[in-house]
Image (spheres, rainbow, N blue to C red):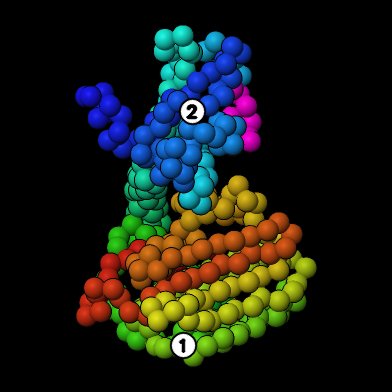
């Protein structure tokens, strides 16, 4: 009775399979309630169905069956399995083969490790972010010191300027200002900033970004078009940060469309709680296997990219309690969907949020 209680109340799914003389699983001898829930059938129904109806047809499953037949008695593996309940679960399988009376049986214990893998992924990303912060601080500090010296000498030269060297002085001053902007962005990455949340018009923010990038788009034979599908309410956000997200996404789209084309920006309300800003390009696309890694620091699909721009875009949107969803198909284009809440859930009166700061490309 004690062992039966352990079997019935286990949080993992447990399957007891009968093996034939070739050590191939032929039928279920017993299953616990969690297994029934995963498979989507009653216990009576499962015990009357062939095991083959539940086995996924992939290489990993074929190899496991081969291990059965070779006489291997105990092994574990991980796989992603879509159960009848239409839920995709990252599953850890533990299989033990032994004799039960006259029969040879396999006890299969499957554990849902989806949340565990998500936690491991978050820890891995957190470690990378720590490295980014330390690296950004070191670089900014090393650049600022010689930059201050150069800036001082430029100011000294300006007091002795003439028509011949004026143009050179202006160019150098402009470049120094750009370097200062870059180092400030490094410091923003290293140190979270407090930003003020205000009601903003998303359509207006998008139009301002389009106006800024229109010359770059025209040079690449690209047309940017906006489509307002429904009436969009003003949403609470930090306008400059969202504009930086839109700029980064559009610049990526422009770079991906080497032969020109159209970028469509669709703004729509998903429901009474969310709005969607969807960027659809006709670029080269992103390989499917790379999609899960987008937004990670130091991961970029560009030849000269460092993978920090998109990372900070994710941070901006997540700080606004939204999310970014990216879909892509090679040689057909990419869709980047920025989903934002119309109201901050439980934070409607909060005016300040901590954040990573402006994205840099």
Q: Which residue is mark 1?
A: 232
Q: Mark 1 or mark 2, which has the lower sequence index?
A: 2
Taking the image as shown, residue 196 lies to the left or right of residue 77, namely: left
> Pointer 1 and pointer 2: residues touching (CB < 8 Å)?
no
Which class describes the residues within 10 Å of circle 2: few (<14), some (14-19), or many (20+)? many
Magenta span contains residue 61: yes
Question: Residue sitting at 60 percent across and 85 percent down?
Answer: 227
Note whether 149 is above or below 245 in the view shown.
above
Q: Does residue 162 show up?
A: no
For the N terminus, the quadrant is top left
Question: Residue sitting at 49 percent across and 70 percent down?
Answer: 338
What secondary structure is marked by label 2? strand
Residue 125, image x and y in percent?
Answer: 40, 47
How many numbered circles does the render carry? Answer: 2
Residue at the limit of the structure toward the bottom, as seen here: 231
Q: Does residue 7 show up?
A: yes
Return the residue nearer the eye: 177 or 195: 195
Magenta residues (range):
56-65
Magenta span contains residue 323: no
User: Where is residue 355, by image quadrant?
Assistant: bottom left
Q: Which residue is mark 2?
A: 28
Question: Residue sitting at 70 percent across and 80 percent down?
Answer: 223
């Amino acid at each position: 009775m004690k062992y039966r209680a352990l079997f019935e109340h286990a949080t993992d799914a447990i399957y007891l399979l009968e093996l034939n003389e070739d050590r191939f699983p032929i039928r279920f001898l017993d299953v616990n309630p969690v297994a029934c829930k995963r498979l989507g059938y009653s216990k009576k129904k499962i015990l009357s169905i062939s095991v083959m109806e539940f086995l996924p047809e992939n290489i990993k499953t074929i190899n496991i069956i081969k291990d059965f037949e070779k006489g291997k008695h105990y092994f574990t593996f991980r796989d992603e399995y879509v159960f009848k309940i239409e839920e995709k679960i990252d599953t850890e399988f533990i299989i033990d083969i032994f004799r039960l009376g006259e029969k040879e049986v396999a006890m299969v214990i499957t554990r849902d490790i989806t949340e565990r893998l998500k936690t491991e992924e978050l820890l891995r990303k957190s470690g990378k972010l720590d490295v980014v912060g330390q690296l950004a601080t070191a670089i900014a500090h090393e650049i600022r010191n010689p930059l201050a010296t150069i800036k001082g000498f430029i100011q000294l030269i300006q007091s002795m300027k003439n028509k011949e060297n004026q143009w050179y002085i202006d160019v150098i001053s402009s470049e120094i200002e750009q370097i200062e902007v870059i180092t400030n962005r490094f410091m923003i990455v290293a140190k979270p900033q407090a930003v003020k949340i205000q009601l903003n018009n998303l359509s207006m923010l998008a139009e301002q970004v389009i106006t800024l990038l229109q010359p770059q788009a025209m040079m690449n034979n690209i047309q940017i078009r906006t489509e307002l599908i429904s009436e969009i309410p003003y949403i609470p956000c930090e306008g400059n940060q969202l504009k930086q997200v839109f700029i980064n996404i559009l610049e990526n789209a422009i770079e991906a469309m080497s032969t020109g084309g159209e970028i469509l920006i669709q703004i729509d309300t998903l429901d009474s709680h969310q709005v969607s800003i969807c960027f659809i390009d006709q670029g080269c696309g992103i390989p499917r296997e790379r999609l899960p890694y987008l937004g990670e620091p130091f991961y970029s699909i560009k030849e000269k990219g460092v993978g920090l721009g998109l990372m900070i875009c994710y941070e901006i949107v997540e700080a606004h309690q939204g999310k970014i969803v990216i879909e892509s198909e090679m040689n057909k284009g990419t869709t980047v969907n920025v989903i934002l809440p119309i109201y901050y859930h439980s934070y409607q009166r909060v005016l300040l949020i901590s954040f990573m700061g402006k994205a840099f490309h």
